[in-house]
Structure formats: C-alpha cells, structure tokens
Image (spheres, rainbow, N blue to C red):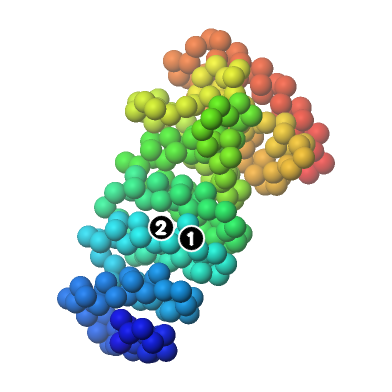
C-alpha cells in the first residue's frame, strides 16, 4: 500500500505500519523492502506522508544503519522548510541520542552532524538549545571525543572573525546562536587539549589578520567589543560564558608552550576588550 500512487492509500498504509510496529517493533529489521518504501515516503510531495514516515524511523534504526539513515535525513533537511524541517532536526537528535547514545559507534561523526545541524537556518529556539545541549553533553560524557569537540568548537568560534573572508564560505557561515556558549564552554573547559586538537592540519585558526595564534584568536573571538556593543549584540548570558572561558583560555596559554608574543597579545586584548564588557548595565 505504501508504494501506491494513491496518496490516501499510501497514508493509510503508513498508519497501518505504525499500528503493527507497536506490537511487533522488530518486523522492519527482517523486511528490507518495507524499510525502502518508508524511506521513499520521506521524499513524498505530501507533507503528512513525509511526517508519518519520519515517525517510523525509530523502529528501523540500528547501530549498523544509523549513519546511512542520518545522512539521508540531513539531505532532506537542506530541502525542507517549516514544521517538517523542525521535525527532521528533532528526529535526527532523537535517533542519535536515544538510550544514552547506544547506537553511535563514532562520536567524531556525531559531532560533525551537530555542526551541520547548528548551521541550519531558521531553527526554532528550542532546537538550537537541543543542539547546544548535545554539544556539551557529548564532550562531557565521551572522553575520546573531547579533543575533536574542542577542534570543532574552535572552528565555530573563530569563523566569526572579521578577517574571515577571501573567497571561501566562512564569512557567510551561519551558526545557531544558542550553540555559541556551548562551543565557548568546551574550548575553555578543555583548553589544555588545544594542542592535541590541532595535531591534524587543515584548520584555519586565525580570527583576523592580527591574530598571533590559536589562543589569541579565541580570546579575540570571545571578548569582541562588537558582540557586546555592536549593531546586533549577543545576549548577556552568552557574553558571560564567553568572558569566563576567555579567561580559561588565557590561563591555558600561560601554562603552555605559547610564545611570549602571543601571550602578550592575549593580555592586551583582554585589557582592552573587557572594558567594553564591564560597562554593561547587566
């Protein structure tokens, strides 16, 4: 029925699947043709059919197929809009985080998924909060992923720099604002992992053309006067997290092999930029 060209029959077929799965939740594991039909329904022109099919994915998700399913859902997120996009993002998070992440074999991969979701435009505030919650929870719970979490969080923070143009997409990059304090907390709390996070080359760590190194870039990003008193300032709750973790990064720089020039640059930025933050009435 779900392969029928009649939309009403297709919808009723999905409803029937849903009822059957309540009593026999493992049936989809043994019938690959049924899984294929449900996945096909995710591209249907009728949003009610797409939504009904989306609700069945939890019955067919396993540790083996999680990556493929989420990859397909991410492709749908790009083309979706409105409530269906909201439903897709929520379903991806549910599939990955269910039962304390029991289906995830590669947490670096999941962190990449969170970065992609954080870049989706038009998210509701609650969805941004959910992504931010996953961002910090994964880094806190999963020790082996922390250095990679620091790397991706660093990337999110420094890509906001005014010098990040020059032909790539970074200057136009969108990040859900709720994720910014989560990224700041990770680079501050685990700032001693910055050297390990940067062992793999290929990441541009410069906030702008004056940046002396990764520690200086982070301090610049998290104490930017533009965030505190610009045209579109960040919430005071975010600024508070930024300043607190900028100090943690500075402390890590002081205890690391950071050069004298970079350490002096960090101190200069803090001395200059924190004046703007201290003038806030909040």
The image position of residue 16, as x and y in percent, is: 34, 89
| Cβ–Cβ under 8 Å for marks 1 and 2 | yes
At label 1, counting other C-alpha atoms closer than 10 Å, the crowd grade (few under 14, some 14-19, many 20 or more) is few
Rendered-image quadrant of the N terminus:
bottom left
- Rendered image quadrant of residue 101: bottom left
Nearest the eye: 127 or 133: 127
At label 2, counting other C-alpha atoms closer than 10 Å, the crowd grade (few under 14, some 14-19, many 20 or more) is few
Question: Which residue is found at the position 81% from the left and 34% from the top?
Answer: 279
Apparent side of residue 184 relative to residue 8 in the rendered image (left or right)? right
Rendered-image quadrant of the C terminus:
top right
Query: Residue 79's mark?
Result: 1
The image position of residue 79, as x and y in percent, is: 48, 60
Label 1: which secondary element: helix
Apparent side of residue 257 relative to residue 217 in the rendered image (left or right)? left
The image position of residue 26, as x and y in percent, is: 22, 78
Question: Which residue is found at the position 37% from the left and 64% from the top?
Answer: 95
The image position of residue 207, as x and y in percent, is: 57, 27
Q: Which residue is situated farthest in the front direction here? A: 5
> Is residue 248 in view from this perspective?
no
Reading the image, the residue beneath label 2 is 75
Apparent side of residue 198 relative to residue 119 in the rendered image (left or right)? left
User: What separation in Å lies between label 1 and label 2 (alpha carbons)?
Assistant: 7 Å
């Amino acid at each position: 029925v779900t392969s029928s060209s009649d939309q009403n029959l297709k919808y009723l077929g999905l409803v029937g699947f849903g009822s059957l799965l309540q009593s026999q939740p493992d049936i989809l594991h043994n019938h690959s043709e049924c899984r294929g039909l449900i996945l096909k329904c995710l591209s249907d022109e009728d949003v009610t059919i797409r939504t009904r099919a989306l609700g069945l994915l939890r019955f067919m998700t396993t540790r083996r197929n999680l990556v493929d399913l989420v990859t397909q859902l991410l492709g749908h997120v790009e083309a979706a809009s409105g409530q269906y996009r909201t439903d897709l993002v929520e379903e991806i998070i549910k599939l990955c985080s269910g039962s304390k992440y029991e289906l995830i074999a590669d947490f670096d991969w999941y962190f990449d998924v969170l970065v992609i979701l954080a870049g989706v435009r038009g998210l509701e505030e609650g969805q941004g909060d959910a992504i931010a919650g996953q961002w910090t929870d994964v880094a806190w719970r999963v020790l082996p992923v922390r250095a990679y979490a620091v790397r991706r969080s660093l990337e999110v923070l420094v890509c906001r720099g005014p010098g990040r143009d020059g032909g790539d997409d970074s200057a136009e990059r969108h990040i859900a604002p709720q994720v910014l304090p989560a990224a700041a907390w990770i680079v501050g709390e685990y700032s001693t992992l910055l050297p390990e996070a940067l062992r793999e080359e290929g990441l541009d760590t410069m906030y702008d053309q004056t940046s002396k190194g990764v520690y200086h870039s982070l301090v610049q990003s998290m104490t930017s006067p533009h965030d505190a008193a610009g045209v579109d300032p960040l919430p005071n709750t975010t600024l508070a997290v930024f300043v607190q973790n900028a100090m943690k990064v500075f402390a890590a720089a002081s205890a690391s092999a950071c050069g004298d020039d970079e350490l002096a640059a960090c101190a200069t930025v803090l001395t200059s930029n924190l004046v703007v933050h201290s003038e806030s009435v909040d």
